[in-house]
Image (cartoon, helix red, strand yellow):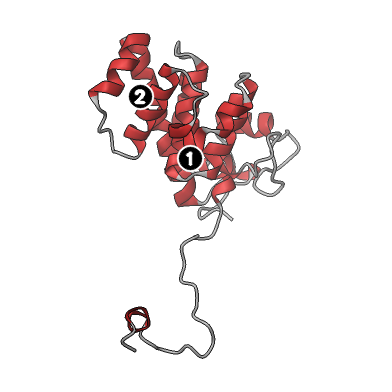
Amino acid sequence: MPRLREVPRAEVTDERILFFYDRLFAPDRDPAVDHGTATGTPGDWWTVFAQSPDVFRHAVRGFALYRNASLDPVLRELGQCRAGWARGSQFVFSQHCKQMRALGMPEEKISAIPHWQTADCYSRLERAVLAYTDALVLDGGRVSDEIFDILREHLPDSEILQLTYITCMYEMHATMARALRLEFDDRPEAVVEVAAPEGYGDRDISADLTGEG
């Protein structure tokens, strides 16, 4: 379950939210109770974001912005998908794998997103986009001139700005999905202590490793 309450249809008064409830689920369904979208997601992103109509509308405008951008959608999706993977969001990564497939991207390129650095299936520009995404997401925006120079060889400044904005926007969505446990990011913490075998007690593990026990 997500960490914030889902807003049932009966409580929604905002017309924009109701429009998406109808479009993504069906007019006769309450998505806060009857989960499931056509893409196989639970759909709780929508019902949780409905907590704030202002936030909901701002986020939806962001979706329209990236779909209307002049940037090549293949490059856009490379950035979005890699941002999801790099930030550890199964939801963002999974959804944008599907979107790349819808654009006709070869399966080889989709499956290589997690290990793009060792894959030879990408063009020089695509590799620069993936490296740029890692610099934005993993290095906090610390981008080398060599990466940026390749982007400028192929893209006008306006499209580099679009790529930067859209990629960072999806890093935000990836982070929020994990924090609020939305959609496919409703998962328990993976890093937990693995208990010692029964009877091990409070022995000093470091002593075992050094032979001093």
Q: Position of residue 26 (x, y in %)?
A: 73, 33
The residue drawn where x is 58% and y is 46% is: 183
Task: Please tell me whether mark 1 sits on a helix, a strand or a loop.
Answer: helix
Q: Residues within 10 Å of mark 2 (few under 14, many from 20)?
A: some
> In the rendered view of the protein, which quadrant contains the N terminus?
bottom right
Q: Which mark is residue 164?
A: 2
Q: Residues within 10 Å of mark 1 (few under 14, many from 20)?
A: many
Sooner in the amino-acid sequence: mark 1 or mark 2: 1
Q: Nearer the viewer, residue 57 or 194?
A: 194
> In the rendered view of the protein, which quadrant contains the C terminus?
bottom left
89 up-or-down from 213: above or below? above
Task: Answer yes or no: is residue 78 visible.
Answer: yes
26 to the left or right of 1: right
Q: Position of residue 165 (x, y in %)?
A: 36, 25
15 to the left or right of 132: right
Q: Quadrant of residue 36?
A: top right
The residue labelled by disc 1 is 85
Residue kind at label 2, given as amino acid type: Thr
